[in-house]
Image (cartoon, rainbow, N blue to C red):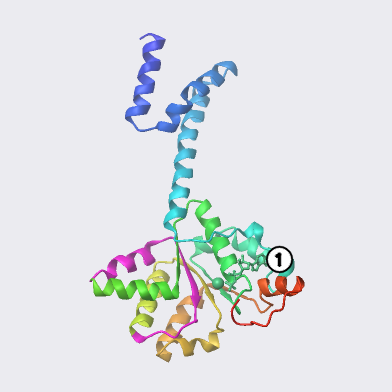
């Protein structure tokens, strides 16, 4: 077989097999290989690495889109000097994602505006960048979505999304008390993830002692906390709201202490 036939056939193989990135890179990789007198196996390695890299990047982009994260936040943008209750080494350790592989949960607790969601989303985006599937939802949205789905007999679709994702980010737990049917659904999601060894990152403005106010049933609240806390890290943030502090530093009156 002549070289030109081999070249044409290689292009065709890549196209038929759907290896588009490798096809696009073929000429450059072959040229570089010839110029640098690379071994055939090095050329193959280079070509297939490009295909894998592109597929990985596409997966990350898709996972970010499907994650439900409307307002992306990066850990790099978190100002640790503005929040003394949060230790950078601790967040760096969490950002290794060991917690995810161990099925541990992370709970960010504290008043509004102190950076709970920022840190939670920053960690979630770190997980997405490593190829994990993440699902972000506020507890209110979870309640609304599960109610709507229940009416259409589609609750299993919602629960399988919440249970199957590699990492569930449950934001704003505790702003509104839950009705019994919603608390039970939340308990089922948390239990199923716990049994499957899958992590949850949760943010709440309530300390654990006050969780009984959110749940209509004290036994359920205790059982839910047991599962959440069994393997977990809690980051308690007490400090001042980040935006308030900036407003105050800019000399803008901060009379509204609730509105954020
Ligand atoms: P919470 O979830 O605790 O109510 P957020 O994480 O939503 O607070 O923070 C409110 C806003 O302030 C967000 O835009 C967030 O990015 C920003 N923010 C809070 N703390 C910090 C910080 N230490 N460094 C940088 N930005 C911060
Ligand atoms: Mg928040």
User: Where residue 260 appears, x then y in whole percent?
Assistant: 60, 76
Q: On the picture, is 19 further left or further right than 248? A: left
Residue 237 within the segment the image draws in magenta: no
Ligand 1 is within 8 Å of the C-beta of the residue at disc 1:
yes
Residue at the spot 35% in from the left edge and 77% down from the top edge: 185
Quadrant of residue 188 in the image?
Answer: bottom left
Is residue 235 placed above or below 20 in the rendered structure?
Answer: below
Q: Is residue 47 above or below residue 230?
A: above
The kind of secondary structure element at disc 1 is: helix
Residue lying at the far top in this picture: please name it.
2
* Residue positioned 53% across, 57% down in the render: 125
139 horizontally vs 111: left or right: left
Question: Residue 29: x percent and y percent?
Answer: 52, 24
User: Which residue is at the front of the view, 190 or 144?
Assistant: 144
Is 170 covered by the magenta stretch? yes
Position of 229 relative to 103 (above/below):
below
Q: Looking at the rendering, in which quadrant would you find the N terminus?
A: top left
Write down which quadrant ligand 2 falls in: bottom right
Q: Which residues are magenta?
A: 153-180
User: Which percent across, then down, holds residue 11?
Assistant: 38, 22
Q: Residue at x 44, y 30 (%)?
A: 22
Which one is in front, 72 or 216?
A: 72
Residue that carries the numbered disc 1 in the rendered image = 80
Where residue 71 appears, as percent x and y from the top left, is: 53, 61
Instruction: Tally the numbered discs.
Output: 1
């Amino acid at each position: 077989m002549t070289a030109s036939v081999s070249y044409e056939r290689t292009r065709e193989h890549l196209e038929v097999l759907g290896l588009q990135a490798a096809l696009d890179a073929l000429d450059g990789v072959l040229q570089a290989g010839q110029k640098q007198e690379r071994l055939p196996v090095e050329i193959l390695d280079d070509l297939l690495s490009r295909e894998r890299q592109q597929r990985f990047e596409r997966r990350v982009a898709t996972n970010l889109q499907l994650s439900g994260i409307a307002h992306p936040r990066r850990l790099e943008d978190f100002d640790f000097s503005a929040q003394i209750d949060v230790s950078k080494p601790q967040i760096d350790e969490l950002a290794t994602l060991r917690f995810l592989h161990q099925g541990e949960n992370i709970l960010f607790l504290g008043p509004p505006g102190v950076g709970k969601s920022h840190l939670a989303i920053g960690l979630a985006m770190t997980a997405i960048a490593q190829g994990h599937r993440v699902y972000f939802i506020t507890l209110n949205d979870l309640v609304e979505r599960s109610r709507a789905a229940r009416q259409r007999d589609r609750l299993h679709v919602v629960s399988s999304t919440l249970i199957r994702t590699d990492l569930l980010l449950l934001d704003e737990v505790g702003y509104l008390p839950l009705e019994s049917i919603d608390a039970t659904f939340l308990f089922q999601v948390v239990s199923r993830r716990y049994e499957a060894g899958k992590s949850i990152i949760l943010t709440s403005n309530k300390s654990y002692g006050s969780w009984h106010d959110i749940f209509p049933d004290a036994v359920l609240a205790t059982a839910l906390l047991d599962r959440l806390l069994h393997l977990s890290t809690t980051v308690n943030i007490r400090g001042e709201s980040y935006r308030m502090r900036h407003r105050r530093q800019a000399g803008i009156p901060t009379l509204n202490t609730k509105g954020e």
